Amino acid sequence: MAPALSSLSPATGPTSGGSTVTLNGTNLSGATVVLFGSNPATVLTNTATQITVIAPAGSPSSVAVTVTTAGGMSNALTYTYVAAPVPVLTSVSPPSGPPSGGNTVTLTGTGLSGATSVKFGANPATILTSSATQVTVIAPANTGTVNVTVTTAGGTSNALPYTYTATPVPSLSSLNPTSGPTSGGNTVTLNGTNLTGATSVKFGSNPATILTNTATQVTVTAPAGPPSSVGVTVTTAGGTSNPLPYFYLAAPTVSDLSPHLGPATGGNTVTVFGSNLTLTSAVTFGGNPATGIIVVSDSQLTVTAPAGSGTVVVTVTTPGGTSTAATGNPYYTYLGAPTLTSLTPAHGSELGGEAIVLGGSNLTYTDAVTFGGVPASFSAISDTQVVATSPGGAPGTVNVVAHTPAGNSNALPYVYDPS
């Protein structure tokens, strides 16, 4: 039986063809050809009651659509080719960009569906999206002010201007801080102008990690580097900035202290020996900050010890880092004040030469014993006992005092007997 058509959907389409059209009817199985006027369509699917095709191109007019099967040719239904509207551009955003291109530009207007080409001057852009009212593209490289146009099946649009603006070369004015540890990892702030869009910050040849970026400031995490001075630069689309010096500093070391002992109350002067001490910013005794830092040289400084207790590690901090106890002898011991509780015997010959046992506490580090201000020879036996030899003196009572790095003890009376 001959095929019969009852409807088309849609019944209109662009002159460029390419749209999918559905034909409904009866006896449509085995369709051998579907004609739009005299032009054959591409058959996609075919059943007894429906055929889907891709419409061929045609001129702006109405044409007869027919289906032919082994049973003959169907009745004709009307399909109208509609000319695509000429595209019209109303705006380009942004209206300017770098000569290198690569930025996204949005074109707004009408009749923009099916955009086949967008040009910036003579250079084609890469089309990202296209709708009836908007096309987004990636701008190509170019220079100066050029005309932007859109081409569709309806023709080429009016032109709108787009200006290629050279990005200014970045300039650095300061770094903060200007030095840091060889291990890197510290935050450095770069100040200057034209820093927007920084693509690279280098310390010498080593790239830093960019944290924040504005037109006048970039903050980065410094990379590691050997102990030396390197140039820091910023690179943007406008080029590479002037370099500013940054100093990689070796971490300080503490090799020795003088003295290694002191009173628990602190307040005494301690000399610290080591290396890389010039830029010392802090000294701690077991975590407690010392005061009165005086840098004598790169290998020596003096401080006023804080109060503390026990044996602690003395550390020095510079922009190069903080010293450790891995090498040298950075240990400092806090001592309790010496106390005397007994003298045995408590009297002796005015001629001296007698062994006197001083009993008390915190006597281990005794460094002097005096009888009425006269130094006596002695031996520290333990933390609770010192044996001294009386130096002799005029008959009468004198004060016996023991001294340690923690200070003087209390005084106990000793009597010189007349011979």
Image (tube, rainbow, N blue to C red):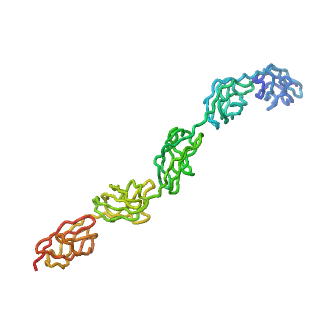
Identify the image quadrant of the C terminus. Answer: bottom left
* Residue drawn at x 56%, y 42% as measured from the top left: 198
* Residue drawn at x 52%, y 44% as measured from the top left: 211
Q: Position of residue 228 (x, y in %)?
A: 51, 55
Nearest to the observer: residue 354 or residue 169: 169
Q: Position of residue 137 (x, y in %)?
A: 66, 33
Q: Position of residue 325 (x, y in %)?
A: 42, 63
Q: Position of residue 393 (x, y in %)?
A: 14, 75
Within the image, what quadrant is residue 131 found in? Answer: top right
Nearest to the observer: residue 83 or residue 149: 149
* Residue drawn at x 44%, y 53% as measured from the top left: 319
For this view, does 338 lie left or right of residue 245? left
Number of labels in the image equals 0
For this view, does 47 lie left or right of residue 399? right
Within the image, what quadrant is residue 404 found in? Answer: bottom left
For this view, does 26 lie left or right of residue 375? right
Nearest to the observer: residue 349 or residue 226: 226
* Residue drawn at x 47%, y 49% as measured from the top left: 178
Identify the image quadrant of the N terminus. Answer: top right
